[in-house]
Image (cartoon, helix red, strand yellow):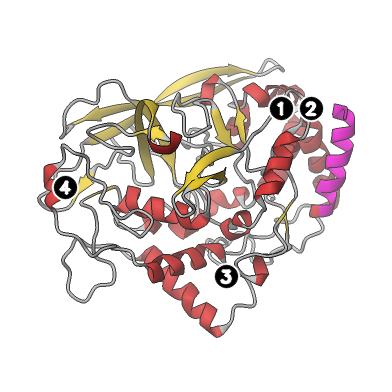
C-alpha cells in the first residue's frame, strides 16, 4: 500500500473514531479517576478497596492493625499514587538538586538475566532505590541535570530541546562500575484494563503487516511469571510486562519493596545484609485479594472521551495526523477480545492511538539498555488518549519515557529512526498546520 493510500485509509478511520461522545466534564483534574459505568454493588466495593490500597502510604513492618505494612526494606516511594497522582503521568525534576518524586532509574549490567531479561546489577539490583526503612541504608542519591540540545527544523526554525544526564552520589553498597541506566517517569494509568484485553494475536498480526516509511514494529517477547513462559509484552515503556496484574506486582516490588505471590522475595541483593535481615510484613506482604483489588481498580478506569474541537478543525487535524504518518504507529483504533476479564472490557473499539509495539525511534532517545527482546533504541508506542489533559492532571507537562519533552511539539521533534520520515513531514508543514496537528493530538 502506498503512503497516499495509507493517508486516505487512516484519515477515514480517524474520522470514525471522532464520532465518539464527548466527555462533558472535560478538563477536570479527576478525568482519569472515573470508573467504567455499570459496576455492580460488589464491583464498586472492589473498586473502592483497590483505590484505597493504591492511594494509601505503606509502613514498615511490624505494624499493628495495618493492612499496608511491609514497606521496603528498600523502596522509592510510600504509595503508588506518589508517582501516579490522579492516575496521571509523573514529571521529572526541573532543576538541579530537585528530588525525583515521580521518577525512577532502571539499572542493569551488560548481558542477559533470567529468562532473557535485563541482568540486574550485582549490588544494586534492577532499580535504584534511594530510600530504606529504619536500619537499612538507602542505596544512595541520584540527581538529574538537563543538557540543552539544539534542533533545526526542515523549515529552518530552531528549537532548544533537552536531554537528561544522571549523577549518582552517596552510594551505600559500593561503586556502580559498568552500569546501564534508564530514567523513567510514571506513566498515566487510564484505560489499562482495555489495553490488557487486546488479543495478543492482534498485536502479532499488526507486527507482521507491511507498513510505509520503513516502519517495522514488533512485539516484545517477555517472561510471564504467572504463566511461567515467554509471551507477548504490552505494558511498561519497553512493553516488558505481559499483563496488567504482572505490571502492578512488579511495581509494588520495585517501587515500594512489597512482596506478592508473583514476587515473593524481598528486593535485597547479596551485599545488602541489613536489607536481608529486616522484618517482613508477611509472606507475601501484598496478598492475592489485595493484588486483585488494585488490578480491578486500574482495569476499570474509563479513558476520557476526546475533547471537542470545531468540526473543520477536527477534520484538518485528522488529515494532517494521517498525512504526516503519525497514525502508522499511533493507531487510531484497536479492538478488545470478545471475551475479557469483565464484560465491559470485551468487544470494545479503542481510540487509544497506540499499536502497543516496539519501534526503534533513533539514537536521541536511546537508553542503551536492552529489555528482553527490546533493544536500547526501542520503545513501546505510547497511547495518546488523554494526553491533552496532562497539564491539568499532572499540574505540568513532561512527555516521552523520561519526561524530557516539555511540550507535545518537543515530543514529536525527538522522534527519529522508524519515525524519522513522519517527523520530517511534520517539520515541513506550515506553522499553522503543525499547530493544527498538535491541537488534534491534545484533543484525543
Residue drawn 64% across the image and 46% down it: 384
- Disc 3 and disc 4: Cα gap in Å? 38 Å
Residue topped by disc 2 = 212
Mark 4 or 2, nearer chain start: 2
* Foreground pick, 272 / 57: 272
Return the x and y of residue 214 as percentages of the image width and height: 73, 23
- Disc 1 and disc 2: Cα gap in Å? 6 Å
Residue interval drawn in magenta: 1-16
Mark 3 or 4, nearer chain start: 3
Residue topped by disc 4 = 275
Circles 1 and 2, Cβ within 8 Å, touching? The answer is yes
Q: Which of the 4 quarters of the picture holds residue 264? A: bottom left
Mark 3 or 1, nearer chain start: 3
Mark 3 or 2, nearer chain start: 3
Return the x and y of residue 155 as percentages of the image width and height: 72, 18
Q: Is residue 101 above or below residue 152?
A: below
Q: Residues within 10 Å of mark 2 (few under 14, many from 20)?
A: some
Circles 3 and 1, Cβ within 8 Å, touching? The answer is no
Which one is in front in this view, the residue at disc 3 or the one at disc 2? 2
Q: Is residue 263 above or below residue 330?
A: below
Residue topped by disc 3 = 35
Label 2 SS: loop
Q: Is residue 133 above or below residue 25?
A: above
- Disc 3 and disc 2: Cα gap in Å? 38 Å
- Disc 4 and disc 2: Cα gap in Å? 51 Å
Residue drawn 33% across the image and 39% down it: 127
Residue drawn 30% across the image and 41% down it: 99
Amino acid at each position: 500500500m502506498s503512503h497516499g493510500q495509507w493517508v486516505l485509509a487512516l484519515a477515514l478511520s480517524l474520522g470514525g473514531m471522532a464520532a465518539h461522545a464527548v466527555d462533558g466534564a472535560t478538563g477536570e483534574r479527576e478525568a482519569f479517576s472515573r470508573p467504567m459505568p455499570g459496576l455492580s454493588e460488589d464491583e464498586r466495593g472492589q473498586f473502592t478497596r483497590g483505590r484505597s490500597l493504591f492511594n494509601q502510604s505503606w509502613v514498615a513492618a511490624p505494624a499493628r492493625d495495618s493492612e499496608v505494612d511491609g514497606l521496603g526494606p528498600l523502596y522509592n516511594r510510600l504509595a503508588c499514587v506518589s508517582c501516579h497522582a490522579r492516575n496521571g503521568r509523573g514529571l521529572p525534576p526541573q532543576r538541579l538538586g530537585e528530588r525525583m518524586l515521580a521518577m525512577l532509574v532502571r539499572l542493569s549490567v551488560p548481558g542477559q538475566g533470567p529468562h532473557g531479561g535485563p541482568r540486574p546489577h550485582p549490588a544494586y539490583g534492577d532499580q535504584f532505590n534511594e530510600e530504606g526503612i529504619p536500619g537499612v541504608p538507602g542505596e544512595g542519591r541520584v540527581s538529574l541535570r538537563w543538557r540543552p540540545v539544539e534542533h533545526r527544523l526542515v523549515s529552518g526554525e530552531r528549537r532548544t530541546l533537552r536531554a537528561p544526564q544522571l549523577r549518582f552520589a552517596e552510594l551505600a553498597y559500593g561503586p556502580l562500575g559498568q552500569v546501564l541506566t534508564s530514567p523513567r517517569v510514571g506513566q498515566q494509568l487510564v484505560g489499562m484494563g482495555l489495553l490488557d484485553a487486546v488479543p495478543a494475536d492482534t498485536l502479532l498480526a499488526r507486527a507482521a503487516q507491511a507498513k510505509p516509511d520503513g516502519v517495522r514494529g514488533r512485539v516484545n517477547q517477555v517472561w510471564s511469571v504467572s504463566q511461567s513462559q515467554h509471551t507477548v509484552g504490552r505494558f511498561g515503556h519497553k512493553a516488558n510486562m505481559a499483563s496488567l496484574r504482572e505490571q502492578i506486582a512488579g511495581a509494588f516490588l520495585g517501587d515500594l519493596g512489597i512482596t506478592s505471590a508473583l514476587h515473593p522475595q524481598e528486593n535485597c541483593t547479596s551485599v545488602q545484609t541489613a536489607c536481608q535481615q529486616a522484618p517482613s510484613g508477611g509472606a507475601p506482604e501484598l496478598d492475592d485479594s489485595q493484588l486483585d483489588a488494585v488490578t480491578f481498580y486500574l482495569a476499570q478506569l474509563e479513558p476520557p472521551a476526546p475533547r471537542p474541537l470545531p468540526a473543520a478543525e477536527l477534520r484538518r487535524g485528522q488529515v494532517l495526523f494521517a498525512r504526516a504518518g503519525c497514525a502508522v504507529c499511533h493507531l487510531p483504533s484497536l479492538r478488545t477480545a470478545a471475551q475479557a476479564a469483565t464484560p465491559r472490557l470485551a468487544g470494545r473499539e479503542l481510540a487509544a492511538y497506540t499499536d502497543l509495539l516496539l519501534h526503534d525511534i533513533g539514537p536521541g532517545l536511546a537508553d542503551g539498555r536492552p529489555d528482553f527482546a527490546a533493544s536500547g533504541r526501542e520503545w513501546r508506542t505510547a497511547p495518546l488518549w488523554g494526553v491533552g489533559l496532562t497539564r491539568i492532571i499532572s499540574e505540568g507537562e513532561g512527555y516521552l519515557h523520561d519526561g524530557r519533552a516539555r511540550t507535545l511539539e518537543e515530543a514529536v521533534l525527538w522522534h527519529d529512526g522508524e519515525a524519522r520520515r513522519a517527523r520530517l513531514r511534520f517539520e515541513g508543514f506550515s506553522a499553522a498546520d503543525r499547530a493544527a496537528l498538535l491541537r488534534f493530538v491534545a484533543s484525543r
